[in-house]
Image: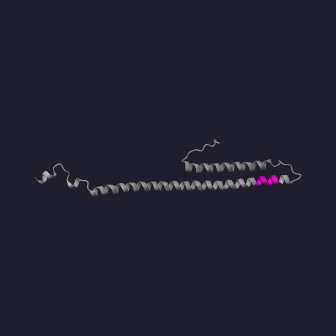
Amino acid sequence: MGVSDRNHGQLSDSRLPGPDADLEHREAAVEARETAVEAWEDAHGQRMEAAKVISEAADERDAVSNARDTAAEKRENDSDRAEMLNPEGEYGTHWAERRNANLDRHHAQDDRTASHDDRVALTEGGVEPDRYST
């Protein structure tokens, strides 16, 4: 039996999948997974930065709203107290100031609602809250 008879019907050694070819395939697969993970981490970092900016803006709006709400309440209480303590005053003569204080409270509440909606959008993936549910 000659050499050609022994190799008849078999692949030559250079075409057989060996340990080196298997290793190269696994390394390529690992490299592809690492590239995908790096891309995901970059996208995640960008989303986290955007969420941080949105959250900081919401916190600032909340702080302004709380300060405006507190100031409006103080103005109303001061006005009411002065009105009640003045024996010659007529209660209800300062409706414009009271109305402005009430409008400030409503604006502050609207700002807090917007901040809350921003936070919900971050955590719920853009699901609109049902404002009319009880």
Q: Residue at x 13, y 54 (%)?
A: 3
Q: Residue at x 70, y 48 (%)?
A: 106
Q: Residue furthest left?
A: 1
24 relative to 48 in the view: left or right: left
Q: Nearer the viewer, residue 97 or 67?
A: 67
What secondary structure do most residues of the magenta stretch adopt?
A: helix
Q: Quadrant of the C terminus?
A: top right
Q: Quadrant of residue 63?
A: bottom right
Where does residue 97 sit, x and y in percent of width and height?
78, 50
27 relative to 53 in the view: left or right: left
Where does residue 49 sit, x and y in percent of width and height?
53, 56
Q: Residue at x 39, y 54 (%)?
A: 33
Q: Quadrant of residue 25?
A: bottom left
**Magenta residues (range):** 74-81
Q: Residue furthest right?
A: 88
Q: Nearer the viewer, residue 85 or 23?
A: 23
Where does residue 65 sit, x and y in percent of width and height?
68, 53
Where does residue 55 sit, x and y in percent of width and height?
59, 54
Asked if residue 79 lies in the magenta stretch, the reply is yes
25 relative to 93 in the view: left or right: left
Q: Indicate the colouring scheme.
A: one colour
Q: Nearer the viewer, residue 103 or 32?
A: 32
Q: Residue furthest top?
A: 132
Q: Residue at x 63, y 49 (%)?
A: 114
Numbered-mark total:
0
